[in-house]
Amino acid sequence: MKKNGHRLLTLAALLGTAAGVIHIANRFIDATSQLKDMLEQLHSKTYEWRFGRIHYTKQGQGSPLLLIHDIMPGASGYEWNAVEKQLATEHTVYTIDLLGCGRSEKPDITYTNFVFAQLLCDFAKNVIKEETDIIASGFSGSFAIMAYRNNSDYFRKIMLVNPPSLSSLKQAPCEDNKLFKHIIELPIFGTLIYHMVSARESISSLFMEKMFYNPFHVTDTLVDTYYEAAHKGGSSAKYLYSSYIGKYLNISINNAVASSDACIYIVSGEKESCYALISEEYQKLNSSIEVAAIPEAKHLPHLENPELFLEQVSIFM
C-alpha cells in the first residue's frame, strides 16, 4: 500500500511538472509569435459586435465590396493583401477579420455557421449601411450564402472562391468530433495541441502542400503573418479551431443555394482538388451560377495569381 501511494505521488509530481513546463512553453509561444508585428495595417477600424470587437479596414470609393477570408489557423483579412488596393480603385472595400480570427476578439464560445451569418448581416446593416457585393474565400462562402438567405436586403452579388463541397457541409458533429473539440479546449494540453497545429512549420507546410500550387510562391512574410494571426489573443485562438474541427460550423446550404436569386459566381484555382466536381454540385442546384477557373493556382488564387483573379472580379462585378 505504501509503495502504491508513493508511486501515485511520484506520478502526480511528474504530471504536475510536465503541466508546468507545457504551460510555460505555451506562454512563451504566445508572446514570441507576435514580436514581428506583421498585422499592423492602415485604415484599421473596430466594430463593437454583440460577441466581441470586430477588426476591419475600409478603403477606396465606389460601390461597397466586402471581402471575407477563409477559416484556417492564422486566417485574417491579410488574405486579401494582394488584391484589396486594386479593388479599392473602383469600390469601397471592407476587409473583415471574422470573430475568432486575426485582430478581432476571440471569445470562448462554440462557433457556428449561424454566428458568422449573423455577423455578416449585422456588419452590412450597421457598418456598410447599404447593399454590398461579397467575395468570400473557402469555408466562409457558406457564411455568405446563409447571410443572404437570412436577409437578402443587405447583399447583392456573391463571389465564392473555392467554396466547400455541399456534401461536406452536411456532416454533423459525431461523438469523436465532440471529444476532440473538448480536448482542444483543455487549458494546458489542448493549447499545446493547438500550438502544434499552428506552428510556423505547420503553416508553411499547409501553404506549400494545399494552399498554393507553386510552393516557391510561399514567402516568409506570408507565413510569418499567418503565424502571428494564429496566436493573436493568446490561447483564445483555439476555440474557433476546435469548433471547425468538431464540425460545429457545418450546415447544409443546399436549399439556400437552390432558392437563391442572388448572382453567384464561383472562382476556383485550376489545380485545386475536386474544384470541377464541387462547382458542378452548386450548378446542379442552381443553373444560374457561373464558374471560372484560374490557371496555375490552387486554394488561394487571389494570393497566388492576383492579376488573373482581378480579371475575374472585373468580369463579375
Image (cartoon, rainbow, N blue to C red):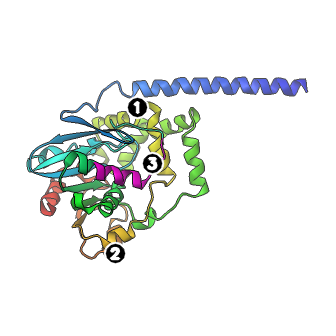
In the image, what residue occupies the spot 33% across and 34% down?
224
Q: Earlier in the sequence, mark 3 or mark 1?
A: 3
Q: Quarter-wise, where is residue 45 in the image?
A: top left
Q: Residues within 10 Å of mark 2 (few under 14, many from 20)?
A: some
Is residue 284 something that shows in the picture? yes
Q: Residues within 10 Å of mark 1 (few under 14, many from 20)?
A: many
Of the numbered discs in the image, which one, if any, rests on residue 94? Answer: none
Secondary structure found at label 1: loop
Which residue carries the number 2 mark? 285
Q: Are marks 2 and 3 in contact (CB under 8 Å)?
A: no
Mark nearest the camera among 3 and 1 is: 3
Give left or right: position of 19 versus 246.
Answer: right
Marks 3 and 1, how far apart at CA: 17 Å
Query: What segment carries the magenta color?
Result: 109-122
Which residue type does callout 3 highlight? Tyr
Residue 115 place in picture, x, y as percent: 40, 51
Position of the N terminus by quadrant: top right
Which residue carries the number 3 mark? 111
In the image, what residue occupies the spot 25% across and 70% down?
261
Which residue carries the number 1 mark? 233
Of 217 and 42, which appears nearest the observer?
42
Marks 2 and 1, how far apart at CA: 40 Å
Of 279 and 61, which appears nearest the observer?
61
Which residue type does callout 1 highlight? Gly
